[in-house]
Image (cartoon, grey):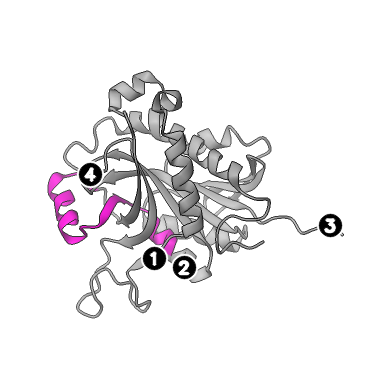
Amino acid sequence: MSSLPRAPVAIVAAMHEELSALLAQMPDEQRVRVAGRDFWVGHLQGQPVVAVLSRIGKVAAAVTATVLIERFGVRAIVFTGVAGGLAPGVKVGDVVVATELLQHDMDASPLFPKHEVPLMGMARFAADAAIGNALAAVAADVLRDPVALVGQQAVDEFSLRQPGVHRGLLVSGDRFVSTTAESEALQRELPDALAVEMEGAAMAQVCQDYGVPFAAMRTISDRADDAAHGDFARFVVEVASRYSLALVGAWLATLPAQDAGSGAAT
């Protein structure tokens, strides 16, 4: 008796360059267009996957997550992209794997505590521990040799010697944090936040509602300060896209035949 086909894992990229790098490694991708987005269905490292560009911002991320779950029945969602470093010691070229996610611009006070999502009774959404642990492990291994990963020129240009892997809080908001004043204000308000971006917490909220495992892995492209815009596009092409391809591929290669995290369907 044949078994049912495995549900796919969703790989969501924040930037076009990252998605292109992933698609180049998918031998059988087929495009399905839903909600104005191209969802690419196929295989990567032998695993069934759906790859998609989320677009930028929390609403776009939430729409993408909902379609992945409702239309494609994914068993887990993994977000890969870039973020601005907040915590001391989180430097350009490091990787942050979220343990929990929060919307730093959510504020329905005084009706609800600041950052709490109204009517949910929570501000922080947990990322899937099993997927996060696996991603952190492969990241530590892959980043051991940054020259092999991105080349000597990129290592020198972006000072990527000894890139680190961090686990902790990732915060999201609908604005690009690009001034030292904004960055310092976030650090004071959320001292345990490691990095800031624009999509993860929204996807985590959708996955919480549906009971689908979610993980976010972000490459630090800047320090979310006055220099945040400098060489951003070049960093995405030369560093972040290569990180994403290597780390996602290495993680998928470790997956058992019918498992993608502690809460995934088998």
**Quarter-of-image position of residue 94:** top left
In percent of the image, x 24 and y 32: which residue is there?
230
Distance from label 1 to label 2 (Cα)?
7 Å
What residue does disc 1 label? 125
What residue does disc 4 label? 224
Magenta stretch bounds: 177-204
Q: Is residue 21 left or right of residue 112?
A: right
What residue does disc 2 label? 208
Distance from label 3 to label 2 (Cα)?
32 Å
SS of the residue at dot 2?
helix
Distance from label 4 to label 2 (Cα)?
28 Å
Marks 4 and 2, the one that precedes in the sequence? 2
Q: Are marks 1 and 2 in contact (CB under 8 Å)?
A: yes
In percent of the image, x 41 and y 21: which residue is there?
151
Nearer-the-camera pick, 253 or 228 = 253
SS of the residue at dot 1?
strand
Of all residues shown, which one is farthest toward the top? 153
Count residues near mark 1 (Cα–Cα under 10 Å), then give few for <14, some for 14-19, many for 20+.
many
| Circle number at residue 2 | 3
Determine if the magenta segment contains residue 119.
no
Q: Are marks 1 and 3 in contact (CB under 8 Å)?
A: no
Kind of residue at disc 3: Ser
Marks 3 and 4, the one that precedes in the sequence? 3
**Quarter-of-image position of residue 222:** top left
User: Could one spot residue 137 in this view of the protein?
Assistant: yes
Marks 1 and 2, the one that precedes in the sequence? 1
Query: Given this view, does label 4 or label 1 mark the residue nearer the observer?
Result: 1
Determine if the magenta segment contains residue 186.
yes
Query: Given this view, does label 3 or label 4 mark the residue nearer the observer?
Result: 3
Distance from label 4 to label 1 (Cα)?
22 Å
Marks 1 and 3, the one that precedes in the sequence? 3
Distance from label 1 to label 3 (Cα)?
37 Å
